[in-house]
Image (cartoon, rainbow, N blue to C red):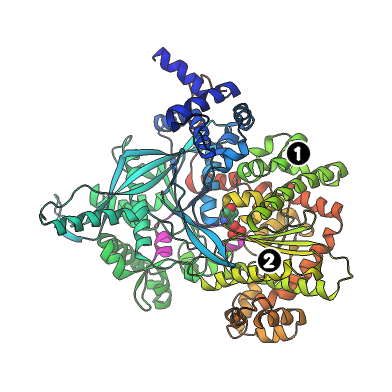
Amino acid sequence: MDARYKSRDIERRSLDVDSLKRSFLEWLVYSVGKDARAATRRDWFHTCALAVRDRVVDRWMDTTRTYYHEDAKRVYYLSLEFLIGRLLTNSLSNLGIIDECRQALDRLGLSMDDVVDSEPDAALGNGGLGRLAACFLDSMASQGLPGYGYGIRYEFGLFEQRFENGWQIEHPEQWLQFGNPWEFARPEVLYPVQFYGRVEEFRDSVGERAYRWVDTERVLAMAYDTPVVGYGGDTINTLRLWSARATSDFNFGHFNEGAYMKAVEQKILSENLSRVLYPNDATEIGKELRFKQEYFFTSASLQDILRRYLQHHTTFDNLPSKAAIQLNDTHPAIGIAELMRLLVDHHGLRWDKAWELTQATFAYTNHTLLPEALEAWPVRMVERILPRHMQIIYEINAKFLNRSKARAAGDNTRLSHLSLIDERGDRRVRMGNLAFLGSHKINGVSALHTELMKETVFADLHAEFPDRINNKTNGITPRRWLKQANPALSELISTRIGEGWISDLQQISALKEKADDVVFREEFRRAKRKNKKRLAAYIARQTGEEVQVDSLFDVQVKRMHEYKRQLLNVLHTVALYNEMRDNPTVSWVPVTKIFAGKAAPSYHMAKLIIKLINDVAKVVNHDPSVHDNLKVVYLPNYNVTAAEIIIPAADLSEQISTAGMEASGTGNMKLALNGALTIGTLDGANVEIREHVGADNIFIFGLTAEEVNDLRANGGFNPREVIASNPALKRALDMISTGAFSPDDRNRYHPILQALTDGGDHFLVTADFADYCRAQDAAMQLYRDPEEWTRRAILNTANMGWFSSDRTVNEYATEIWDVHPVKPTHDGEGFR
Ligand SMILES: *Cc1c(COP(=O)(O)O)cnc(C)c1O
């Protein structure tokens, strides 16, 4: 190796303060192209990110090279969303150089917080599903698992939410506007992805029937790689995101200018494939562009996976022992048909062999039971856009239905449930059934959700394949959600029990005995208070509202959806407001109700509920008769960065979905880990959180999933009767319906009232109201006793070890993927 290169190499990899400072100055001038006096905060962020990236690259190449040399089995996590948020603190923290970087910036007269705040939030996801993918990337890298993320490099992430007169207004999220220092463009990693055209049948060299997909329109998928820094910096994995590029094969047969411009326009349009993330959470709208996005990234990823496999292998026999492909929901499920197409049409495998390999390679995670969220694409559309895939789906279906037990028993109803095609109305391809059939394992994301999967959506497929469905309860990474987001608490924890919890969260259980230690409780409270002050300042900046740091911070932050029941929370808010006004002499526990979350732009009911919360806030916050004992704030633009400020400051965590409707939730885990007490229904992972933290340390209320099911099935629920018999509820609803919060438009909230009465209250808001208020009262009463509250808060933190995504990923690795940690070989120079 060239000696000069080597010394520079070592300098670039050194992690001490001086070397970081020298790198910053060098990068600022030679890469950002700015003089220190002219540099903006954003320039310094780019400088800092590039210098940190330098310290990652060698280890990244070492990691990739080791996987290659060992021909390690890799896991490929295919996800339409990766909600990763900011990366600077994450990279510094996982490399263990936060303090060094802070000092280096300090010596340059810069505040690290300002630099950190200049990074845009990579919002390449809607909510829980995308954040799960990001937590899994961190956990795979931190445990040395050879894991790759594959997704789309959206030019516009999830829209930016602002409020105008309390209404949600969407603005484009231009996170790439000033460039992205973390990514490496790979213009040479380019795959064609085809659409439309037709299928030709022919006889292959041995006279077998074979198929050719011809006259297609082609788009190119170009790779952008982002290093995923594992904790300790030993393993650096890859997140590969695809960007659409037009092909250069212009049809120069058209010589007149109009046709030429038309061809150019066509090319430009093809790049729209990676333009924007669909802002739907748990509700699909059957849009053609969305389907094309799904196929685009899935096809590119599979071509890339097969290319990597073929570097070491000449047949496909070992594919399942070298590659595990996890489908994050059905969004990449077309990959089942795509792999069959690649194996059969391109590589000449026999159908049965290809099917065996496909099933052994794929596994599928289901994320929702909501019927409106189960993807089902019109057969006519699939036929037009992917004609060969439609044939393959028919073939899979025919072979499966022919062999199924239902056919043997002559049970046509069951047969129709098993089919890949929903024959009711316009015929549709059931992507969930396709993902199920093409996978060897299918998992739900919490114990309850997995059981409900077996009883509902996949009841018939489960009967057919009783060994396929298994549970993998979600988890969250303790690096981002405790160590980085909550330095006050994580430093306290580390001084008491050491740093082992960061990579082995089960060790946090050592805090249990500290719950009875009055000094530790005091320190725990001090950390919480520090976080609450930080949040209060953020609230003041964002909303102009002053909140009391010592009030109970009651937090509901998540996507806005009727099943998540923000409406139940705001109804309680109105009832509490009334109680406080009626009893001004009582010494009330001061409460700050904190909401945040985006609504899908087309989800009118959700947007109306946002407006209601903002309208209630306007009235409550300015009513002197409640003496500042109640404040309501709706923080705009909930994203990972906002979550990192809000969650460490929460006292009470609202997890109040209608039982049976939230698959798992992960916000519930982040909040409990940060010492918030949960008020929640027995839904999703709340059930398991209760088991771990203990029933005494959580406020459970409401109908169970079984009771919800019975109530709906028997039609024995009349919301009007419930409302009439509950004066507090009736009064709150009357105020809303008569314009107490909307004097400018008294009819504004009729759709909400309508849904709760004539609409039958599908989400059982009224049914759970009384018990919710009881649980809220219990929480407020407990908050009067800071010692007891803190004791329970500590027990929450101490008992959340099992909810680390390290545990989840390990379960996937051993029970589904059969992948094992690989220790990268580093040459070791200059890196501690
Ligand atoms: C964790 C997280 C979610 C998921 O929250 P739930 O309460 O589980 O729905 C959504 N958005 C962001 C930004 C998150 O960090």
Quarter of the figure with the N terminus:
top left
Q: 820 and 622: which one is in front?
A: 622
The residue carrying pointer 2 sits among few (fewer than 14), some (14 to 19) or many (20 or more) residues within 10 Å by Cα, namely many
Please report contact status of discs 1 and 2: CB closer than 8 Å, yes or no. no
Is 177 left or right of 721, judged from the image as shown?
left
Look at 41% across and 69% down and name the residue there: 418
Whether residue 252 is visible, yes or no, is yes
Give the distance between the C-alpha atoms of the residues marked 1 and 2, in whole angstroms.
31 Å
> Up-down: is 783 above or below 179?
below
- Amino acid at dot 1: Leu
Question: In the rendered structure, does residue 430 fall within the stretch colored magenta?
Answer: yes
Q: Quadrant of ligand 1?
A: bottom right
Look at 43% across and 57% down and name the residue there: 277
Q: Specify the label residue 492 is tagged with.
A: 1
> In the image, residue 275 lies at what x, y percent?
38, 54
> In the image, residue 740 lies at what x, y percent?
69, 79
Q: Specify the label residue 681 is tagged with.
A: 2
> In the image, residue 693 lies at what x, y percent?
74, 54
- Tell me which segment is drawn in magenta: 429-450
Question: In the rendered structure, does residue 443 fall within the stretch colored magenta?
Answer: yes
> In the image, residue 480 lies at what x, y percent?
61, 43
Is 138 left or right of 705, judged from the image as shown?
left
Look at 62% across and 26% down and name the residue there: 107
